[in-house]
Image (tube, grey):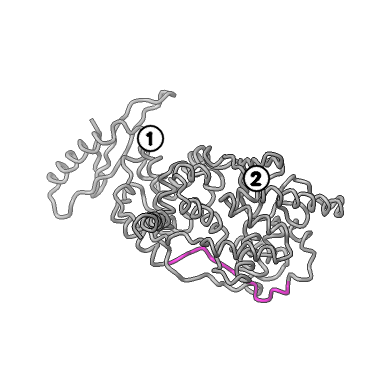
Amino acid sequence: MASIRKRGETFTITAYLGYNNEGKQIKKTTTFRPPENVTPGKAEKLAHEFAVVWEKQVKGYVALDENITFAELADWYYETVAPNVLREQTLIPNRRAMENHVIPRIGREKLKNITPPMLDSMFCDIRKSGNTKTKFRFKDRSVIDNINKTKFCKEINIDRTTIRSARDNCVTFEIAKKIAQGLAIPFNALFDDVTPTKEISGSTLKKIKLNLSAIFTAAVKKEIMRRNPCSLVTCAKSDTPPVQCLDEEQSRKFLEALKEQDDFQLEVIGNLFLATGIRPGELCALHWDDVDLKTGLLNIRHTLIRINGQLRREVPKTNKSERKIILPKYIINLLKKHKKLQEKYSRGLGDMWINRGAIFTNLTGNYTSRSHIGRKIKLVLESADLPPLKLHSLRHTHASILINSGIATKIIADRLGHSETETTQNIYGHVFEESKEKTMQAVEMALFT
């Protein structure tokens, strides 16, 4: 039976839950505050009734500690649970999203006080308040034009691609801070805050909800909480627009434009995207030992990720992402020519060449980044008067060509590295619908026209 002790206007209730491995008694304590304007006798009776219900609830929850704050729970999750179930490239942005959006709003709330209506209000506020990921731009870009970029990047621990991107585009606060410290120039004198003030998308809000729910679910499994308040939260509508891609005529124009520009490596990259549907990170991680130039077999078994500003070659998230693709003869010939040109160029650089074995490199042999390729591809699209699509749209273009060619969904899913065919159908649903209409038109033309 729980013990009840009156302390001023409240009652302290203690439940005893046996002993731990060290022989110490396990107990849990809570506080009951009776309603206002009740007699002392009525207050004590209500306290006893509450104690009976609370003790029944707390039995079996040896680790129950709903008096800790959400910020403390999040720290526990990301330090002890997440490293065992999430990859580093997933854990870091997930934790950053919690620190940017959730902890400022409910970080100080005790777990026992967090309710589904409170979370509904929080998500509504997050969406309206907009994107909290700050972005900064140089006031005067010429400030980094006359510095030794290789030496400077080593001093502040960022790569050359990042510093080039910083000159022409926006950067995060972390990168801007490093640059300001490295140049010994006051931050506000060097950068302008150009953070866009727009609503967070429904799909981004949905990701935040899934991350938050994972934290509460882990707390329930470890008997820190009784329930997951996120399970009853109203889910945000997904407002992800349909994937964008080139049609067949636009694809041919794009390939012609690749031939006309003077970067042969970029021509190989653009052709490989359309021929294989490879992911940008997978393409950047390709090594020469991943492709057999005699048989044309391409092994996709790594992806290139950026962690804390550094590029790293890692294995993919799922086993399905590792796959083999037979390359067309035209692509094999492009790769053979590219390899000869790369070998000739590397010999000219001598010791300055970083021999990682990568197929696609920067000027010194190191990995090239998807952002760098993306900027170059946009220029090619612009020169051909084509839409300014993202790099991933070339993968979507490959998928749409397969769908419109009548290839089975299972084969397309395997080629793209999707774990389930449902993923393929969800991403390319509108393409499948257009393909159905083309199929009907083909039948009509063949038989009834």
Residue 189 higher or lower than 367, as above or below: below
Quarter of the view holding residue 372: bottom right
Q: Which mark is residue 313?
A: 2
Residue 441 higher or lower than 46, as above or below: below
Quarter of the image where the N terminus is located: top left
| Spot occupied by residue 411 in the image (x, y as percentages of width and height) | 48, 42
| Spot occupied by residue 396 in the image (x, y as percentages of width and height) | 51, 55
- For badge 1, the amino acid type reads Ala
Quarter of the image where the C terminus is located: bottom left
Label 2: how many Cα within 10 Å (few below 14, some 14–19, many 20+)? some
Residue at 63% from the left image edge and 47% from the top image edge: 328
Determine if the magenta segment contains residue 142. yes
Is the residue under label 2 in contact with that under label 1 (CB below 8 Å)?
no
Q: Which mark is residue 7?
A: none
Query: Reading the chain from its start, which is encountered first: label 1 or label 2?
Result: 1
Position of 279 with respect to 406 (left or right) is: right
In this orientation, does residue 107 appear?
A: no
In this orientation, does residue 444 appear?
A: yes
Q: Of helix, strand and loop, which one carries label 1?
A: loop
Residue carrying label 1: 63
| Magenta residue span | 130-143
